[in-house]
Image: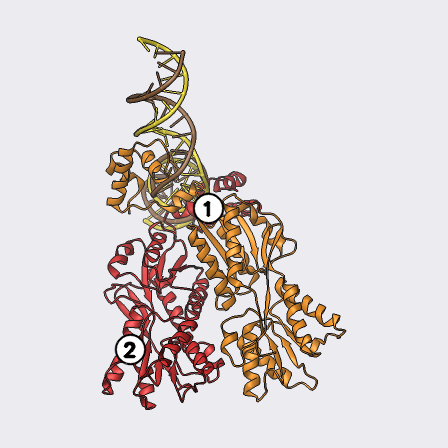
Chain colours: A red, B orange, C yellow, D brown
Amino acid sequence: MYTIKDVALKAGLSQATVSRVINNHPYVSEDKKQAVQRAMEELGYVPNSSARRLRNIKTKKVAVLISRIVNPFFSQLVDAMEQKAAKHGYQLILCNTRINPEKELEYFELLQSKQVDGIILAAAENKWEAIAPFTRYGTVIYCNEYDPDATVTRVRLDQVEGGYIGTKHLLDKGHRKIGYCQGNDSSVSVNRRKGYLKAITEAGIEPNPEWMFKDIFTIKDGRDIFRRIAAMEDRPTAFFTGSDEVAAGMIKEAQLNGWCVPDDLAVVGFDDQPIATLMDPQFTTINQFTSDIGEKAMEVMLEIIEGKRENRAEDILLPLKLIERQST
Amino acid sequence: MYTIKDVALKAGLSQATVSRVINNHPYVSEDKKQAVQRAMEELGYVPNSSARRLRNIKTKKVAVLISRIVNPFFSQLVDAMEQKAAKHGYQLILCNTRINPEKELEYFELLQSKQVDGIILAAAENKWEAIAPFTRYGTVIYCNEYDPDATVTRVRLDQVEGGYIGTKHLLDKGHRKIGYCQGNDSSVSVNRRKGYLKAITEAGIEPNPEWMFKDIFTIKDGRDIFRRIAAMEDRPTAFFTGSDEVAAGMIKEAQLNGWCVPDDLAVVGFDDQPIATLMDPQFTTINQFTSDIGEKAMEVMLEIIEGKRENRAEDILLPLKLIERQST
DNA sequence: TTTAGTATTGAAATCGATTTCATAATGTTA
DNA sequence: TAACATTATGAAATCGATTTCAATACTAAA
């Protein structure tokens, strides 16, 4: 394991000169520069990044907090971020919070201890007041999720609109009994519910709490929900599921029980994942252009890190689009 | 941003004593220990990890190299690894190589510059001789992929067996014309092909290169392959796809063209992802217990890092299982 | 009451880089 | 040619922690 000292010795120059070559400083003569490069080459020298960071060099790393990578929405989001980051010579550190607020908060030590230049919050179990103190250690922005009190940039979608257009679509198809699923009480869910409620109250319908489900995430959860509504006396004829996984599970289970989608039950997913076109019927869903969100968020993050943009309370909203298929 | 000096000053003690408290060294009196802890608490002090690393403290980070996170196999693998790592206080750094050998090699700087304690190679575009020099900077193991020359631990599946049982199953169903798909020429693919060829030659069948496809990864690729075989004069009646995505695309496209699966075309996937039970027909595939592989690989990695296990040329093989459903 | 051993603490060296400051060599302008 | 600016280089300070070493206080055995 060679150090800058070894290189300096080998090249017959000082550490300072070697450092200048490494960092492309001016005022190094061409011949010495080459001598240093040759010495580095021969020793296979790589600068120790911890030592460099101690002198406040950028880490060229950004952490992304997500709930779980197995959720295809997050895989796609992270993939887009990574691609953008790599293009600018940055690396991505993936942090699964598993919807655990303490675990989420622990990751901020990465910032405090200068292991990353910034953190993108694509999961947000903590209130902004818990996050705020960390902002002095590096850049923090939100992506998809957000806290309305946050004083930093938020790259996200208009989820109120998302909930609204999904529900409105079912209303337009003539449904009056519309069920609703959501995950945990995140900003995304809260807003979508607002949109859902807005649409049905606008149509003069009283929301039925029996038909509204929380903490529904997976294919299996979708299957369970179907069984629960099938057992009801008075049951919904349509469902806004808030997730393609849930929609997929619900549709599959309905079919296994001899129901016909959309005639017996209409279902709207969310996200337009590959599964939406693979099942039979292909299902109606809402495309949220996941890659675009990830790419934009990383773009904003890098601009802030490199001082080309200010990190102030600002919402960058990306579009949503209803994709009508055969499940409604 | 407070340093150990600030804490020492506030506690009226020396940096050395503060450091001893941080690292739980013996020979610190109870009252001073508490004084230090109080001072740290009040300042909200967090040790600078770069400074610590400079003194050769473990980073408690492991990097995983994969080709692309959007592949559900890798999401699941990484998820299992992360879960295991977190349980031991380690963090995971995700590195997408996008099947680019240079990019793959670049990530090894993480080891050289002491940013991670080890690297798990779940993608392997480079030969072992290119990787070997880096092993002196930290722990390197293979997971799923591997190079036969490697002198380190390899947690993986018997892919020859995988190719064999998938193909054998189709032969048992009476098929004699069996197509084959694979991704790039990785160790996994090479071995699966061996298994495929072994099965059909055992059955006295001459392999037909027209029916063997390379660089097939996605749902879309599966759709394309269907169109290509549909256009053939003499075409296969069954397919070993090596991937649930490819199987899904192929089945869907076949159905859209009025073919019946499995009567007109039998299809075997690989991986037993959720999609395999969601489509109609649910399809036959090979379960490779992805989470178990990820978990085992991380377990081995941590044992090696912590000196409880030797990192020698050793294959840790996990089981594969054919799951028969309705597509064959 | 010595003496040896153990517990407690801090000053200073150290890890491997970057950066400041001083100095020397060279070039440019009046 | 004198005065000044620019280029080139290295010694030493620095970043924020850990660790060595020496000094001191306390305890137990002789």
Camera sees residue A63: yes
Q: Which residue is mark 1?
A: A48
Give the residue pinned by disc 2. Answer: A210
Tags 2 and 1 on a common chain: yes
Q: Residues within 10 Å of mark 1 (few under 14, many from 20)?
A: many
In the picture, residue B177 is in which quadrant?
A: bottom right
Q: Give the answer, above or below, for where B246 lies relative to A298.
A: below
Quadrant assignment for the C terminus of chain A: bottom left
Q: Earlier in the sequence, mark 2 or mark 1?
A: 1
Identified at 28% across, 47% down, the residue is: B1
Point out which mark residue B300 bears: none
The residues tagged by marks 2 and 1 sit, at their Cα atoms, a distance apart of 60 Å
In the image, taking residue B233 as reference, residue B157 lies left or right, namely: left
SS at badge 2: helix
Q: Chain of mark 1?
A: A
Q: Chain of mark 2?
A: A
Look at the picture and state if B318 lies above or below B211.
above
